[in-house]
Amino acid sequence: MIVRWTGRRCFIGPNNHEAITIRPQALRIIRLPTRHYATTQQDAAAAATTARTRNIGIIAHIDAGKTTTTERMLYYSGFTRRIGDVDDGSTVTDFLPAERARGITIQSAAISFSWPPTSDKQAQQPIPAGTRLSSVPHNINLIDTPGHADFTFEVLRSLRVLDGAVCILDGVAGVEAQTEKVWSQASAYAIPKIIFVNKLDRDGAAFGKTVKEVGSRLNVWPAVCALPWFTEDGQLQGVGDVVSLQALKYAPGGDGKDIEVVSFAELQSRDASLASELKKARIALVELLSEHDDEMVEKYLEADEDHLAILPADITRSLRKCVLQRPQQVAPLFAGASFRNVGVQPLLDAVVDLLPSPDERPDSEISLESNVKCGLQPFLAGKVKIEDLEPNPKGKKQQKKGKATPTVQNVDACALAFKVVADAKRGVLVYVRVYSGTLSRANASLWNTTLQNAERSPRLLKMYANDAVEIDSISAGQIGVIPGLKFARTGDTLISFSGASKTGPPRPINTMQLKPINVPPPVFFVGVEPNSLSEEKHIKESLNLLLREDPSLHVSIDEESGQTHLAGMGELHLEIARDRLVNDLKAKARIGKIEIGYRETVTMASGAIEKIVEFDVASKISKAGCSIQIESRAEESPSNSDDMLLEVELHDNNRLLISSPTLYSDGTPKDEEQAGLPENLPIETVLEAFRVGVSAALSRGPIHRYPIHSVDVQLDFDHAKHIFPTSNPTVLAGAARQAVQAALRSSSALSENIIMEPVMLVTISVDEASMGSVVHDLSSSRGASIISLESADDGSESSSDSSGSERLPIDTAKIYAPIDKFAGGHTDKSAVTASSNTAKQIIARVPLKEMVGYLKHLRSLTAGRGTFTMVVDRFERMNAQRQRVVLSELRGGFEF
Ligand SMILES: Nc1nc2c(ncn2[C@@H]2O[C@H](COP(=O)(O)OP(=O)(O)OP(=O)(O)O)[C@@H](O)[C@H]2O)c(=O)[nH]1
């Protein structure tokens, strides 16, 4: 049977008899009712829409083919009329100029399309029981994630909102270092994953070896669902479908829409070797599923123990079940070559058939009052009682027990801003994922629970890469865009609340936050200097925008020198930020050399330093004060004093402890005779102003101007003595800042060896032959401490997953993998295993300074084959000699 995908989708039923055709898809505008006024019918439509939604991401090592595969997905779904090409910069998803210029994905692009192509109406109908999911249209929200290590935060940010992921592997390189890293990050978020082995058209592609590596390096059982189908001379011509027992032959050189479907019977006469391999693969698949799903055992017995007789629909159902198991132990694996347009439609079917819809995902965790955790759904259902939420504030009168949280039913929607982009045409766009309720245009007021401010969102959009369509609402489980927000940053929680006052919803609803993403500390920085004074304002605004887009960047301003530092997680990260600042946001500034972000610390306590300061603002004198003591950070938590009002973690492992002998934690005076705080200064405002002042002072050390690391700051204030009728947040912050600066000067003068350097945890993948020279270089010339040396394929390390349970390594001998006939002579199974055993992994702790420019060096030591990933492990104090060397070198830095 020959099928042509020409904007009409043809589905092949389990027995290859049925063919259903569906009209070509138009850009779909989903109009959903708001939750409040929804009728039962509308609710049913919303539920059907959620069931037909897949929020997925593509994860992989750099250059594995994520963007190339995405372009095919858009093309086959009818979203684009031609296939974009990474190599000539015409892709839909890499739309930033910097991305197109470099051919890499930097900022994840969120994009929606339908698979299979559809009209609006169909997507809101419930799916009849027993129907193959991929035979009815689904709305796929796809987030293309970057593969470069410098953009780990971008990857985490998008993983946070995904319900499932496609992991793309390069069929020549196999499982690479970055793949392992992203895979384990996705596992930590319990994200179900399927695998696509790409680039099987390339010389040296080794499908079987890659399958084995999935088991050994990703510690998951590969369920081989597709096999590459080669011509006799080794050209990739299609794929064998292990589930449906048929083969798909793609027209050579075509756009991948002309597919010949070859039944198993026919295949036996046309290509007996593929037919026989399909049979082996089917047996292996049924055996594997039977080990993880009891129903598959029943189906096997019902089929008279004939692996081939089990219905494809039953196998698909079992695969789906295994994918959704937590922890995931089985990963369905598909094959193809996106660039040659082979194997992408079966992958799209798998996305719909095997990955979960939003309502199949576990409930989201929220935090309230910054330190109480509970599930979002029980909280919104009013099932969480106040006494469960109160963190038992010190010195505070107890709340009445047993009272249900007030007015949770007024929360119309709760959403996470997972990406902020400054679009040249449309201004600032905030990408959100809605976790409960419906964000609606009609209810345009939003409360940002992270920033504690209100914003208006009169318009909502659905993004199709860089095209936007206006919509009325975004319902739970959906991804959409709010244009025009002034403050919201990536990672903020936004809620829509009926009847919110000017100061937002009542407590604790106003503090409710979806689990934030941990931002790793920045380890490189550059100086940013405006070309002229008149440019200062524009540069400040542009930097603010960059920070809203990417919270893994940090900006700090040295009060004394006026110098601005932009800090980031890697050289490429800062290079891209610089491009964005200078080229896209047109900031006229001189950007300095990239330097390592060292830190300063103190080893001697400062003694208490009291400051009372006066500020003259617009001819009005305002006055405030406090007392500060600084010491090296203690391991243990401070003792539970009655005076303690706040304990808060600041950047760089610093901790702030605020105490007052005169106030309760709710701001009322302990002495009832005494006047309380001025009306304009509620306790939250006072504490926040002190926090802001302390953080600002810690961003520059007194000796070397590096940020301060690992100190405890004890701030004491007596409201009768330190807070005046003229006090305001600015002067309170100023008092705290000046007191911290004085305390730092006093203790730094007494401390020694106060510079700390970033030390990285580095994972290097090399082949056995180069391992000796790489280890020697690391330990003799780079001050590394080697943590472990292991074969990357021996599975000698067990891994843990999101549930925290340790999993045993997988025995690769038990993994089914076909023989790689065309992979450079690996013609038998033992060769596959032997070759895969030669990959070695070195894990070491190395100072960042020694890793600058390391990739080039590693390549020269390993004949170009070595790769590595690194993450910040910790900051360590340098010994006196190393500190001297570093300080003497610090005049320089290094050039881009
Ligand atoms: N031969 C062959 N080349 C491919 C295939 N898929 C992708 N490529 C090429 O591999 C290179 C990288 O592809 P991309 O799609 O940009 O990879 P990516 O994973 O998106 O890369 P980043 O965005 O940088 O992370 C490009 O030159 C593609 O043309 C394939 O199936 N076969």
Image: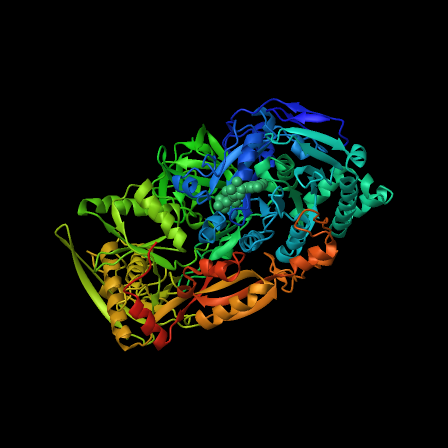
Q: Is residue 452 visible?
A: no
Residue 574's spot in the image, x, y percent?
37, 52
- In the rendered view, does 537 fall on the left or right side of 154? left
Which residue is more in the foreground, 751 or 204? 204
Q: Answer with the quarter of the image where residue 614 lies.
A: bottom left
- In the rendered view, does 553 fall on the left or right side of 15? left
Which residue is more in the foreground, 257 or 402? 257
Quadrant (top left/top right/bottom left/bottom right) for the C terminus: bottom left
**At 49% across and 34% down in the image, what residue appears?**
474
**At 46% across and 72% down in the image, what residue appears?**
780
Which residue is more in the foreground, 177 or 235? 235
State whether residue 120 is above or below residue 270: above
Quadrant (top left/top right/bottom left/bottom right) for the N terminus: top right
Residue 43's spot in the image, x, y percent?
57, 32
**At 69% across and 24% down in the image, what residue appears?**
20
**At 52% across and 31% down in the image, what residue appears?**
83
Q: Is residue 716 visible?
A: yes
Q: Which colour scheme is used?
A: rainbow
Q: Answer with the quarter of the image where residue 202 lies.
A: top right
Q: Answer with the quarter of the image where residue 457 lies.
A: top left
Residue 169's spot in the image, x, y percent?
59, 47
Check the image and name the residue furthest to the top. Answer: 23
Check the image and name the residue furthest to the right. Answer: 304
Check the image and name the residue furthest to the left. Answer: 619
- In the rendered view, does 7 fall on the left or right side of 494? right
